[in-house]
Image: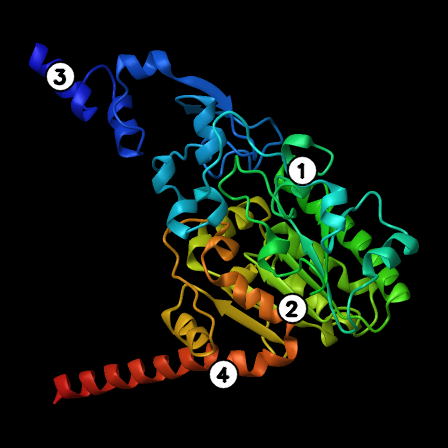
């Protein structure tokens, strides 16, 4: 009997029910009585439940996760159900903020509005757009030709909620360190100092997926008004948009209300957008003039399927590719040919270290060097060259493999 009990505690198998074995498989180790007494229930600070898809269709509060103590959450990120903290997706992707050591007694507070404004970062919310005077003061001191980059977050953020504020997360120069997805977009885009003005655009994206989907359309119209004010203050300054998930829909929804040339480039990362809606947007004057880079990957396939299940009868998403054209580029970062072509151009992007991840488009090492070149040096990264080195290389590899298969079939037939 003692040997059987020791075996259960060591392997997590057997015993009453199959929960111990299940927790062993997903990375929490055997559920021994000592761990059961020592555990404490804390809530994930960044939203979402214990499984990455929980809370997608409901607007309820996030489900609690299990950790041994709150210090682990503050210093090493929330415990993930598919493995321990050190083997979670952030560490496999190589996110810098997740591996940075933090004092166990206190976590550094996120960047405030005054701190960001002095370094080329302007926090903006869709419910309170800045006036012309504030925009003019934010653009003072920038060299001629320095761009304005509007960064748009995705699902489950809300600037009115302190626990889900995007301006203390990815839209901050010093994001909070209690979340493994908190990577500073403006800092990695090189928008500190005088390289350009970074605008963090916050909008209410909490609640169910249907509510957030409708809010994305309304936020897109508010973003259109913001771009119009920027054109009035600085008509010769280029404006670029970069959005993740539903933030990509916000960026596309802003185009119908703008004239041609109002937006230079759009970078859509794991876009939660349907292809049919995108084709309608591209028929507008601003849509025909803008250059769009659609960043996709196989690790986002599950989330594309969930979006199609939530909003059926809308056709395929942009995860399967966009409408194409000379001003459209599909960057499939899960393809070896794409990474090889980008490496030839000087962008060394590491392959994805996980199979399922909605945030791989900005977590994997090296990808921000590409985004930085796209928005800061568009003349050095023409879409025609990127298309030739990535999509053209995939087509060449496909033709070679097809010819090799044909020769193999003919040899076997003969």
- The picture quadrant where one finds residue 203 is top right
**In the image, which is nearer the foreground, mark 2 or mark 3?**
2
- The picture quadrant where one finds residue 341 is bottom left
Quadrant for the N terminus, please.
top left
* Badge 2 or badge 4: first in the primary sequence: 2
* Residue matched to label 2: 375
Please state if 133 lies on the left or on the right of 337 as rendered: right
Please state if 64 lies on the left or on the right of 226 as rendered: left
On residue 210, which mark appears? none
* Badge 2 or badge 3: first in the primary sequence: 3
Count residues near mark 4 (Cα–Cα under 10 Å), then give few for <14, some for 14-19, many for 20+. few
Residue at 45%, 38% (x, y): give it: 101
Quadrant for the C terminus, please.
bottom left
* Badge 1 or badge 4: first in the primary sequence: 1
Inter-mark Cα distance, 2 to 1? 25 Å
* Badge 4 or badge 3: first in the primary sequence: 3
* Residue matched to label 4: 388
Inter-mark Cα distance, 4 to 3? 61 Å
Question: Which residue is nearer to you in this view: 57 or 228?
Answer: 228
Inter-mark Cα distance, 1 to 3? 46 Å
* Residue matched to label 1: 165
Inter-mark Cα distance, 2 to 4? 19 Å
Count residues near mark 3 (Cα–Cα under 10 Å), then give few for <14, some for 14-19, many for 20+. few
Inter-mark Cα distance, 2 to 3? 59 Å
Secondary structure under tag 1 reads loop
* Badge 1 or badge 3: first in the primary sequence: 3
Where residue 122 appears, as percent x and y from the top left, is 76, 51
Residue at 47%, 29% (x, y): give it: 73
Inter-mark Cα distance, 1 to 4? 40 Å
Secondary structure under tag 3 reads helix
């Amino acid at each position: 009997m003692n040997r059987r009990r020791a075996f259960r505690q060591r392997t997590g198998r057997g015993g009453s029910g199959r929960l111990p074995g299940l927790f062993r498989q997903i990375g929490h180790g055997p559920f021994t009585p000592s761990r059961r007494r020592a555990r404490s229930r804390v809530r994930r600070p960044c939203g979402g439940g214990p499984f990455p898809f929980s809370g997608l269709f409901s607007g309820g509060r996030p489900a609690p996760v299990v950790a041994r103590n709150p210090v682990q959450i503050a210093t090493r990120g929330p415990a993930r159900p598919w493995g321990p903290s050190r083997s979670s997706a952030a560490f496999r992707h190589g996110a810098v903020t997740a591996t940075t050591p933090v004092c166990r007694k206190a976590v550094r507070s996120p960047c405030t509005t005054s701190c960001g404004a002095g370094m080329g970062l302007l926090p903006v919310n869709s419910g309170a757009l800045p006036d012309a005077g504030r925009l003019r003061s934010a653009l003072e001191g920038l060299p001629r030709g320095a761009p304005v980059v509007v960064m748009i977050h995705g699902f489950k953020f809300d600037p009115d909620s302190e626990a889900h504020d995007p301006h203390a997360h990815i839209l901050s120069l010093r994001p909070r360190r209690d979340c493994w997805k908190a990577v500073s977009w403006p800092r990695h885009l090189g928008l500190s100092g005088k390289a350009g003005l970074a605008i963090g655009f916050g909008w209410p994206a909490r609640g169910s997926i249907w509510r957030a989907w409708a809010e994305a359309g309304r936020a897109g119209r508010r973003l259109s008004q913001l771009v119009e004010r920027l054109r009035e203050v600085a008509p010769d300054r280029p404006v670029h948009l970069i959005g993740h998930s539903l933030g990509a829909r916000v960026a596309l929804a802003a185009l119908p209300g703008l004239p041609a040339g109002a937006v230079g480039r759009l970078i859509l990362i794991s876009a939660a957008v349907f292809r049919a809606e995108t084709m309608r947007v591209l028929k507008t004057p601003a849509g025909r003039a803008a250059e769009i880079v659609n960043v996709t990957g196989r690790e986002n396939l599950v989330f594309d399927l969930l979006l199609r299940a939530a909003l059926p009868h809308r056709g395929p998403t942009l995860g399967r590719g966009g409408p194409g054209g000379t001003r459209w580029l599909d960057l499939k970062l899960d393809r070896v040919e794409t990474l090889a072509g980008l490496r030839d151009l000087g962008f060394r992007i590491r392959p994805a270290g996980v199979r399922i991840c909605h945030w791989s488009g900005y977590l994997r090492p090296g990808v921000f060097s590409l985004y930085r070149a796209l928005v800061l040096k568009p003349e050095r990264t023409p879409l025609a060259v990127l298309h030739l080195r990535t999509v053209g290389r995939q087509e060449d590899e496909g033709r070679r493999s097809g010819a090799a298969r044909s020769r193999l079939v003919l040899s076997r037939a003969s």
